């Protein structure tokens, strides 16, 4: 909470021509709420790209303003840099707004130089040989595009072309530049008022993700499930003590082009006046590295704008989010204020389920396509449960990554990683954990008795515990020596493979003549490897 909750009138044009207006600045919100939406097209197995977030947020700010009588320009400082200006809604003015503008001129090395065109600055040079510092007055004669030309008492020269480290020092920040993203609106009041206004808008550069951690019990039939709600922001604005929530589900939202913000780094490319043979190789390398990684930059009274670092460690807050219904969407509300910091990520506890019933099954698909027998890869391990209270769940699950651990809780072992899709209550939950290291299959064509293809499927388990195997047969008119079920309209073989043992299925199926694979030479010998 700021020391003075009211907004200050910075400039009052009491006397002047008709149409003069007062400028009122709101330095920041008194209260803010942030609702995060995931990137619509990002699959659950892919984590958010912290350097390029394609989700968005709905920001709602409450501010108290003091407006004089007449027409005023009200400037909302500290809005999100990724604001979508056309989405902004401002309420609370008794007589409404006249117009609104997203001020794009942010303080940066490039805009600072452009807005100082024709003004006097100080150029500070450091001697590479002695370390001596000299300062000279100069006038900026060109903008930030390309070479920057300065005029000094000695004549005209281009910035950074002397071969010496050079820095421009400005006495003040030109008018019209803001160090913080700003939205301005023009309002009119019949008399001086103090109003509480609400500013709501969409902003790009946010995202969120659920991250699940499952610990498998020794019996293999239960897991302890925990989930983090990871919030990420690449915006330059921090929202302190915000009411924060995340929305799961896909909205039909049209992509809106965000208004570009002017400014940025000052990029200059210039050879020194001396020849490269006069400069030691180490010095050339040092200068190249300085230019590549940002160099000395342009200083404003000794301050610099830090490079955003989303990879830095973020504080982890253990607060359980509360799930609420939002029509067809699901909303996860964080019950305590959370600071959504600039260029950062934060995790809060989403859910905890100590005893969830699960099954670890091994799945594989079998088919013949274009005369080739499939599969050509190992079976996949799949963690299976059902989102019901009886199984220990019974709540909406947002999509995200899952990591499965096993073994001694004091020294856990990573068993696999997968992803969870959005799952409503009552739906099946299936997480693919990758290929199996201990369960293998052999699928062979034995011949064409009676014009039908005859196949043999052998499943081997080299582990010390029995496993469940599920094989989907993408064939027509299947007749097998075991009872088959159905999955998605195709025959399904479910078998319990004993420890250090195997299970065998033989079946016949219709195969078009033009799709029949050649019969292997050793088709009459089911297990030739055992006889060699």
Image (tube, helix red, strand yellow):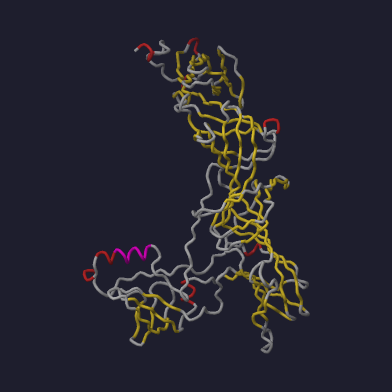
* Residue 528 vs residue 260, the one in the foreground: 528
Residue lying furthest left in this view?
A: 277
Residue 318 spot, x, y in % from top left: 62, 48
The residue depicted at 44 percent of the width and 24 percent of the height is 372
**Which region shows up in magenta?**
285-292
Residue lying furthest front in this view?
A: 410
Is 15 situated above or below 166?
Answer: below
The residue depicted at 42 percent of the width and 78 percent of the height is 142
Residue 175 spot, x, y in % from top left: 55, 79
Quadrant placement of the C terminus: top left
Is 246 situated above or below 282?
Answer: above
From the viewer's perspective, is 225 left or right of 187?
left
From the viewer's perspective, is 346 left or right of 167?
right
The residue depicted at 67 percent of the width and 33 percent of the height is 392
From the viewer's perspective, is 313 left or right of 92?
left
Residue 33 spot, x, y in % from top left: 68, 58
Quadrant placement of the N terminus: bottom right
Residue 400 spot, x, y in % from top left: 58, 42
* Residue 444 vs residue 503, the one in the foreground: 503
The residue depicted at 60 percent of the width and 15 percent of the height is 483
Q: Which secondary structure dominates the residues rendered in magenta?
A: helix
* Residue 25 vs residue 511, the one in the foreground: 25
327 part of magenta stretch: no
Q: How many marks?
A: 0
């Amino acid at each position: 909470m700021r020391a003075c909750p009211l907004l200050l009138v910075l400039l009052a044009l009491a006397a002047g021509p008709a149409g003069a207006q007062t400028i009122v600045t709101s330095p920041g919100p008194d209260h803010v709420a942030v609702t995060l939406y995931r990137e619509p097209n990002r699959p659950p197995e892919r984590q958010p790209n912290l350097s390029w977030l394609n989700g968005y947020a709905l920001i709602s700010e409450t501010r108290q303003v003091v407006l004089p009588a007449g027409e005023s320009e009200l400037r909302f400082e500290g809005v999100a840099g990724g604001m979508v200006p056309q989405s902004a809604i401002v309420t609370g003015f008794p007589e409404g707004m006249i117009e609104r503008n997203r001020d794009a001129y942010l303080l940066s090395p490039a805009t600072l130089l452009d807005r100082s065109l024709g003004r006097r600055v100080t150029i500070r040079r450091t001697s590479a040989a002695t370390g001596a510092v000299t300062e000279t007055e100069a006038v900026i004669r060109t903008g930030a595009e390309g070479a920057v030309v300065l005029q000094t008492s000695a004549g005209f020269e281009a910035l950074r072309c002397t071969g010496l480290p050079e820095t421009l020092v400005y006495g003040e920040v030109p008018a019209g530049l803001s160090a913080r993203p700003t939205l301005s609106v023009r309002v009119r009041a019949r008399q001086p008022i103090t109003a509480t206004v609400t500013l709501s808008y969409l902003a790009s550069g946010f995202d969120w993700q659920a991250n699940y951690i499952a610990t498998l019990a020794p019996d293999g039939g239960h897991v302890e499930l925990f989930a983090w709600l990871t919030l990420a922001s690449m915006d330059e604005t921090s929202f302190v003590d915000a009411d924060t929530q995340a929305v799961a589900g896909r909205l039909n939202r049209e992509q809106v082009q965000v208004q570009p913000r002017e400014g940025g780094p000052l990029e200059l490319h210039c050879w020194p006046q001396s020849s490269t043979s006069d400069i030691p190789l180490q010095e050339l390398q040092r200068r190249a590295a300085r230019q590549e990684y940002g160099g000395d930059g342009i200083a404003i009274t000794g301050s610099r704008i830090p490079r955003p670092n989303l990879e830095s460690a973020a504080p982890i807050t253990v607060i359980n989010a509360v799930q609420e219904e939002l029509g067809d969407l699901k909303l996860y509300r964080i019950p305590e204020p959370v600071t959504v910091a600039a260029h950062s990520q934060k995790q809060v506890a989403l859910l905890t389920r100590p005893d969830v019933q699960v099954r670890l099954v091994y799945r594989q698909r079998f088919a013949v396509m274009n005369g080739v027998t499939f599969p050509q890869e190992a079976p996949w391990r799949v963690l299976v449960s059902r989102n019901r209270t009886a199984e220990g769940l019974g709540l909406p699950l947002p999509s995200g990554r899952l990591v499965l651990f096993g073994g001694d809780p004091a020294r856990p072992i990573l068993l696999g990683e997968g992803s969870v899709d959005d799952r409503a209550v009552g739906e099946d939950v299936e997480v693919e954990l990758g290929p199996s290291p201990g369960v293998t299959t052999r699928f062979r064509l034995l011949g064409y008795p009676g014009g039908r293809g005859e196949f043999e499927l052998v499943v081997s388990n080299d582990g010390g515990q029995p496993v469940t195997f599920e094989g989907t047969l993408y064939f027509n008119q299947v007749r097998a020596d075991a009872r088959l079920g159905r999955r998605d309209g195709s025959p399904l073989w479910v078998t319990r493979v004993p420890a250090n043992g195997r299970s065998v299925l033989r079946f016949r199926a219709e195969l078009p003549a033009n799709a029949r694979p050649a019969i292997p030479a050793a088709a009459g010998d089911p297990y030739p490897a055992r006889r060699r």
